[in-house]
Every structure is written in C-alpha cells, then in structure tokens.
Amino acid sequence: MSIETKDVEHVAKLARLNLTDEERDMFTEQLNAILQYAEKLNELDTEGVEPTTHVLRLSNVMRDDVVQDSLTQEQVFRNAPEEEDGQFKVPAVLE
C-alpha cells in the first residue's frame, strides 16, 4: 500500500488546507515512509506475545477509599479573602 499525491490532495481538501506543490510532495513522501515502517513492523514474529495496552505492566495505583481527617471550616477560611455565612465571598462575575 502506498500513498499517492492525489490521496494527499484529497485529505488536504477535506481538512481545508491549501498545500503548495512542495508540501504535497513532502507529505506524500512522509506518509509513505510511515506506511513502510508499519509494514516492517508486520514482519516481526509476535507468535506467543500476549496483546497488551501498555509496554509496562501496570497495577492499580488508586489508594483505598478511607475516611481521613481534613481541615476544619475555620482552617479553610483562614486564608480566604472574605467569608460570609460559612461560604467564600467573591466579587460577582455576572450582573
């Protein structure tokens, strides 16, 4: 399989890109190089290799959901510029 200039022109048209002749030739060459590399990968013997989504084996990195002490309301409002009735008071953004 290979990419031809007309394929690049078609994709450029769909993406509404105006390509110069040099860009068209460059992208055609680059896309063909990518396809050649993909074909090279198909030559690898992957018999017995289990499909995976990651190169590294991953384990669950989530911690247990355990209730912990948190800041009190007084500690939270200590650095707040303004507070009213237990809520942050901020300037109105809508009129």
Image (cartoon, helix red, strand yellow):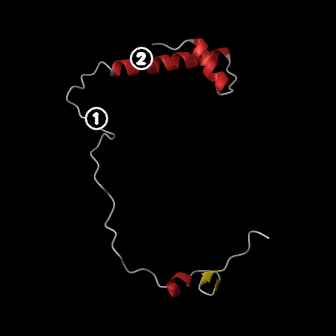
Do tag 1 and tag 2 residues touch (Cβ < 8 Å)?
no
Identify residue for label 2: 36
Q: Name the residue rendered at 39%, 22% in the picture.
A: 38
Please provide percent x and percent y for residue 16.
69, 27
Q: Which kind of residue does numbered mark 1 sit on? A: Pro
Please provide percent x and percent y for residue 11.
61, 22
Count neighbours of disc 2 (C-alpha within 10 A) and say few if under 14, some if 14 to 19, many if 20 or more: some
Query: Residue 51 — which label?
Result: 1
Query: Residue 82 — which label?
Result: none
Q: Name the residue rendered at 35%, 18% in the picture.
A: 40
Please provide percent x and percent y for residue 1.
45, 13
Question: Under tag 2, what secondary structure?
Answer: helix
Q: Is residue 7 above or below residue 60?
A: above
Q: CA distance from mark 1 to mark 2?
A: 23 Å
Question: Under tag 1, what secondary structure?
Answer: loop
**What is the total number of numbered labels drawn onto the structure image?**
2
The C terminus lies in quadrant: bottom right
Residue 49 relative to residue 37: left or right: left
Q: Which image quadrant for residue 19?
A: top right
Q: Is residue 55 above or below residue 37?
A: below
Q: Name the residue rendered at 56%, 20% in the picture.
A: 27
Q: Which kind of residue does numbered mark 2 sit on? A: Gln
Q: Name the residue rendered at 63%, 18% in the picture.
A: 10
Residue sitting at the far left: 48
Please provide percent x and percent y for residue 22.
64, 16
Q: Is residue 95 above or below residue 11?
A: below
Q: Earlier in the sequence, mark 1 or mark 2?
A: 2
Count neighbours of disc 1 (C-alpha within 10 A) and say few if under 14, some if 14 to 19, many if 20 or more: few
Q: Which marked residue is nearer to the observer: mark 1 or mark 2?
A: 1
Q: Which image quadrant for residue 55?
A: top left
Residue 11 relative to residue 40: left or right: right
